[in-house]
Image: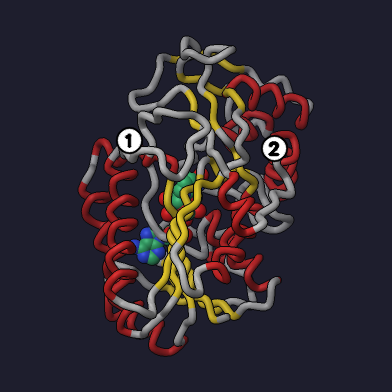
């Protein structure tokens, strides 16, 4: 299939592109490189440096490539930033998604996969969190993803050729052999912990140790980025004639303390840790119920356990201590 991947120079997008290429798909990456890296783009994919804010740039690239499918990874995704500057999210994230969708209709692209988020579930009534959990976005970032989910709902109703999947990731982590996590600023727990082991930070801070969890620190569900990419490839086939919504995690939670302890074990480094006050908007526990995608699409995570995820990330960081060259 010809797959148009926005944000394919970013962390998850670049691994998805790699897995698409390995599966025999033809890929065009559309990325403005604001947060991504040219070196992360698989050499078999064509990179178009363009911005989703500019419909003409999308139109030019799509008109030339004529994709069968779109995977939409490109977005700003910092919850904290979205609480300080909501317009980047309620405005830009949503409008960029709309620009992309307008072009999808113009070029009659029948399949669309959205990177959605666990930030739709700020106040879950049941954990693990299933797809039918009530949606309570936790920030303008989460709201921006929900807005695009609603756009997709209406597009599929109005345009018979159009189908979509919303994949709501919990915490993506780990690395493939060649592609890993290099965000600036880095705010994700696993790469931050590994930066301590690499000697780039003195210690790691745990935000709150008085949550209602067994060890008092927040619990999150980590999913290996290659398993996440594989879920996209399965979804590509599954949405030929129907729409799908899946929560994507491992169905198992690990506390911040457990992540740090696992990183100590994997790296052999003491990784000093300290406690800071809770951050606003951090729910105690976020765990996905991933049974739906397992049952419907036969998705089988290859690296469900935390040690495998941290080990993969560590291997990549040791090989690329400064991240990507650019
Ligand atoms: N990392 C996670 O754990 C996680 C969890 C849930 C959802 N998500 C979602 O998954 C997607 C990918 O996340 P990531 O961690 O790989 O992010 P990332 O920041 O590494 O990648 C985003 C990519 O999009 C590009 N981009 C941003 N704005 C653009 C624009 N206007 N035009 C063109 N390109 C643009 C950036 O240059 C970058 O390469 C995001 O949509 C994010 O919201 C991520």
Q: Are marks 1 and 2 in contact (CB under 8 Å)?
A: no
Which quadrant would the N terminus be assigned to in this image? bottom right
**Mark 1 neighbour density, 10 Å: few (under 14) some (14–19) many (20 or more):** some
Badge 2 is on which residue? 310
**Mark 2 neighbour density, 10 Å: few (under 14) some (14–19) many (20 or more):** many
State the SS at label 2.
helix
Image quadrant, ligand 1: bottom left
Badge 1 is on which residue? 138
Q: Residue at x 75, y 40 (%)?
A: 308
Judge whether residue 279 can be spotted in this image.
yes
What distance separates the C-alpha of mark 1 from that of mark 2?
A: 27 Å
Image coordinates of residue 287 in percent, x first then y, are 53, 33
The answer to whether residue 109 is above or below residue 295 is below
Which quadrant would the C terminus be assigned to in this image? bottom right
Apparent side of residue 173 relative to residue 267 in the rendered image (left or right):
left
Residue at the limit of the structure toward the bottom, as seen here: 64
Q: Residue at x 57, y 23 (%)?
A: 256
Q: Is mark 1 within 8 Å of ligand 1?
A: no
Looking at the image, which is closer to me, 254 or 11?
A: 254
Looking at the image, which is closer to me, 300 or 101?
A: 300
Image coordinates of residue 193 in percent, x first then y, are 61, 30
Q: Residue at x 61, y 27 (%)?
A: 254
Judge whether residue 324 can be spotted in this image.
no
> Can you tell which quarter of the image residue 31 is in?
bottom left
Image coordinates of residue 33 in percent, x first then y, are 44, 63
């Amino acid at each position: 299939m010809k797959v148009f991947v926005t944000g394919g120079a970013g962390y998850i997008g670049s691994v998805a592109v790699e897995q698409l290429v390995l599966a025999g798909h033809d890929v065009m990456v559309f990325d403005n490189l604001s947060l991504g890296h040219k070196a992360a783009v698989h050499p078999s994919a064509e990179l178009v440096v363009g911005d989703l804010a500019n419909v003409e740039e999308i139109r030019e690239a799509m008109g030339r490539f004529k994709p069968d499918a779109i995977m939409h990874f490109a977005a700003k995704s910092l919850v904290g930033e979205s609480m300080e500057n909501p317009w980047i999210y309620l405005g830009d994230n949503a409008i960029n998604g709309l620009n992309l969708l307008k072009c999808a209709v113009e070029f009659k692209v029948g399949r669309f996969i959205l990177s959605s988020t666990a930030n739709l579930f700020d106040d879950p009534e049941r954990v693990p969190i299933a797809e039918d959990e009530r949606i309570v976005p936790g920030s303008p970032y989460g709201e921006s993803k929900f807005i695009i989910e609603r756009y997709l709902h209406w597009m599929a109703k109005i345009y018979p050729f159009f189908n979509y999947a919303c994949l709501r990731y919990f915490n993506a982590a780990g690395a493939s052999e060649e592609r890993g996590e290099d965000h600036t600023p880095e705010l994700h727990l696993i790469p931050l912990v590994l930066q301590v082991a690499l000697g780039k930070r003195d210690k790691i801070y745990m935000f709150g140790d008085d949550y209602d969890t067994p060890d008092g620190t927040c619990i999150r569900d980590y999913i290996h980025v290659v398993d996440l990419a594989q879920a996209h490839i399965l979804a590509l086939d599954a949405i030929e004639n129907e729409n799908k919504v899946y929560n994507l995690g491992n169905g198992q939670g690990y506390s911040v303390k457990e992540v740090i302890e696992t990183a100590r074990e994997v790296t052999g480094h003491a990784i000093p840790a300290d406690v800071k006050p809770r951050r606003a908007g951090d729910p105690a526990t976020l765990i996905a119920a991933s049974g739906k995608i397992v049952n419907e699409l036969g998705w089988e995570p290859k690296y469900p356990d935390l040690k495998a995820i941290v080990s993969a990330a560590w291997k990549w960081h040791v090989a690329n201590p400064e991240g990507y060259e650019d």
